[in-house]
Image (tube, grey):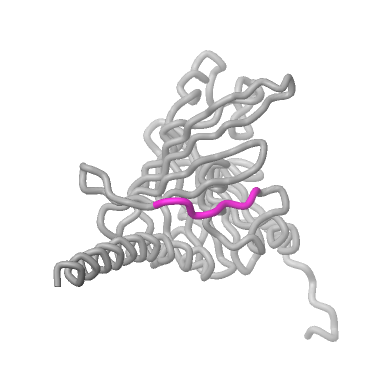
Amino acid sequence: MNKFIKVLTATCLAMGTFACSFVEASNLDTYRNLLINKKYTIKYVNITPEERVTNRDKVTLVGNNTMKSGQVSKLLYKPLECVVVADGANRYEEIGVNNLKTCRLQNNNGTYFYTKYDDAGKTSFWGTKKNTVTALPTNTIAYAMQGDAFGSGDMTRLLNAILPDYMKSSDMPSYRYVNSGWLSNGLNYVDYKSDGRNMEAIRYYFNGYTLVKIASAQFVYDDKGQLQARRCIIKINEFSPTPAKEYLVLPNGIKEVTKKAKKTEDEE
């Protein structure tokens, strides 16, 4: 009888552990499905932005000199505030610091690139010129080959890590599930890891069923063969299954000046 109880207890513990892992994995599956179906609104802050590669931001920021070079420090090494909205082929990405955001809007008319900034307390935009934008043809083949972007390069990598390989660009490494569990602060987590010479460990944090943070540690060999480490922390403010429609149209205050192609007699 005692032996039976021990076996039953062990079985229950094993099933409980399996159920715990299943629930945690299901948490991430929910967000993976949102990304695959391209129906979501994501708002987040990259607390540890990537280092600057060039000093181009010391010249022209938004098409005209709206900021003196001495004020550029306001933009450096600051948390990046990002918004990504998708509703099928319609898509919006926004990334920026303080009062300066770069935006990309993709819809049925094409793709718009513009900068949004606060100008003396008033929101202004800069596309082809101030408060004016032109739609460019959307290179759907290129986007299909490169995979979806999610604002910052860090977030793009961390979200692509949970997607099937066929949805990623060819230069993205493969990631695999390695662990899951609970923390003393009540959060639960799921761990992923990439393999190869350059390795990255990613942890997705959940408060119940809600994704609240992503953290990673990268270990990369530089050109001199020296191992370099870098951490990344993303705070998730919103990751919902409802596309925020207001982001998928040009905001008030922007004039579109796209030249429409003339219709041929056959099209008429």
Query: Could you say which is closer to the camera, residue 28 or residue 40?
Result: 28
Give the residue at x 25% y 57%. Answer: 208
Query: Could you say which is closer to the camera, residue 47 or residue 171?
Result: 171
Give the residue at x 49% y 35%. Answer: 217
Q: Specify the quadrant of the image occupied by residue 102.
A: top right
Q: Position of residue 255 (x, y in %)?
A: 57, 54
Q: Residue 57, relative to residue 33: is it above or below?
A: above
Q: Position of residue 22 (x, y in %)?
A: 36, 65
Q: Specify the quadrant of the image occupied by residue 262.
A: bottom right
Q: Position of residue 187 (x, y in %)?
A: 26, 48
Q: Residue 139, relative to residue 49: is it above or below?
A: below
Q: Position of residue 72 (x, y in %)?
A: 52, 20
**Extreme residue toward the right, this view:** 265
Give the residue at x 32% y 51%. Answer: 181
Overall secondary structure of the magenta stretch?
Answer: strand
On whether residue 174 falls in the magenta region, the answer is yes
Whether residue 19 sits left or right of residue 102 in the image: it is: left
Which residues are the magenta region?
173-179
* Residue 49 shows up from this direction: yes
On whether residue 213 falls in the magenta region, the answer is no
Q: Is the C terminus in the top left, top right, bottom left or bottom right quadrant?
A: bottom right
